[in-house]
Amino acid sequence: MAITKEGVHIKGTKKSLPDGWSTYAFRYAIFPTPEQVTKLEKSFGCERKVYNEYVSDLYEYLESIGFESGFIRYKVPNYTTITAKYDYLDKSNDSFVYNDAKMRFQAAIKKYNETYAKQPIQYKKSVRKKMKTIGYVPTLKDIKGMPKFHSKKQGKLSYTTNQTNGNIKITQENGAYFLCIPKFQEGISIHLHRELPIDGIIKKATIKREGTKYVVSLSVDYFCPNEKQVEFVTADEVIGLDYSQSELYVDSEGRTAQYSRYNKIIEKRQRRINKSLARKKNNAKTDETGNIVYSKNYEKQVKEYQKVTTKAKNQRKDFLHKKSNQITNDYHAIVVEDLNLSNLAQCLSLGKKLHDNGFGMFRMMLQYKSKKKGKYYIVADKYFASSKLCSECNHKKDKLKISERIYMCDNCGTKIDRDYNAGRNLKYYGIRILHEQSIIA
Ligand SMILES: [Zn+2]
């Protein structure tokens, strides 16, 4: 394996990175100048144009072979074939802009083939309506799942550029930092709120516009071996976490993540904007060709909605990072129940909420952070009845309804919050496991 200043050249995927090397994404806010904004927007626009040319070529091809339904077998041409064909396409952008369009187009075909090709043809609701009311004859592009033309509004505002010969780097000038990417070698002002690893190698940069803000996500390879595994643990250093729908978790000390208080603020904002969006949507008119026309205000509100949603997503993730960092710093062993999340979601018909509050992501964070810090991450056996056991006397209840929020022991008379009880049981479970392995005396 060769390590050069441009990057680590290894064949295959990141799985084959040498021992101790990992790839991580680092996200930063960038502040392009007005001229740079124009250039970036032009790149996003070009990506969309090339993508749309790909789609239009595809439809032309499908029509030529009389395609009706089923799998799309189509050899995706290289982007140079596309850009050469259309004179009007700007060729002054970073070539990865065009390549990005190709990748996205390939992904769109793959998605269609995997998800929709096997099903009977479906049409979108708006198309069905047009078919019914004005006898509209659907075309290939109306088929659900088919690669669609990207409009200016819904097109993805991003592109990814890869490292070649050190053309993606961070420079420093008078205490300020700049991101250099192809065609922007003068540097775009970047807020490095978090340091990049020394000796880290930037492999890719994805430039995005989210709402009105610009961000870059840097994919960085760097050497950071896991810390040595903790050899001995005391019972106090073990924590059990029981999943809680509203609070994310309740731990074996009876503390919660205080997630609901935090979530309420975010949700309130989302609800308010959702309401006004629905109202404006209802006011939309249908023109003579059957197309739905939305008001200017509606479009403005959509933008606002996207802004709020992105912010909420980031805030939640941030919260999960902070909590998982804190727990893996403070404790040597973390014990969680074996939750098959999709199962549980169905059983308890909590579906949406469960996925919304990010417990799956939280567990993933706990797991990799534990590994990194040499801590123990223990998942209880799926038959371990953490809720039904009494954490005082170990008596097991036959039945425990979801609605029973307080655990009452028939054997010793203990009355305890259901989730707190389960958290304690998980802790004791972990202690037992660690004891068996002589990690706890
Ligand atoms: Zn008991």
Image (tube, rainbow, N blue to C red):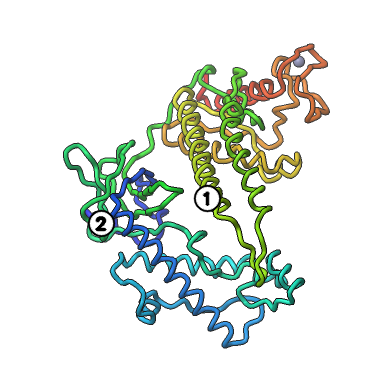
Residue 405 screen position, x and y as percent: 75, 23
Q: Quadrant of residue 337?
A: top right
Disc 1 crowd rating (10 Å Cα; few below 14, some 14-19, many 20+) is few
Residue 197 screen position, x and y as percent: 29, 41
Give the residue type that dot 1 points to. Lys
Q: Which residue is mark 1?
A: 300
Residue at figure coordinates x 83%, y 28% from the top left: 399
Give the residue type that dot 2 points to. Phe
Disc 2 crowd rating (10 Å Cα; few below 14, some 14-19, many 20+) is some
SS for callout 1 = helix
Please state if 197 lies on the left or on the right of 149 as rendered: left
Please state if 303 lies on the left or on the right of 380 as rendered: left
Residue 135 screen position, x and y as percent: 74, 77
Residue at figure coordinates x 76%, y 20% from the top left: 407
Residue 345 position (above or below residue 289): above
Residue 341 position (above or below residue 82): above
SS for callout 2 = strand
Q: Nearer the viewer, residue 49 or 439?
A: 49
Q: Nearer the viewer, residue 177 or 441?
A: 177
In terms of sequence position, does the residue under pointer 2 or pointer 1 come before the other?
Answer: 2
Q: Which mark is residue 184?
A: 2
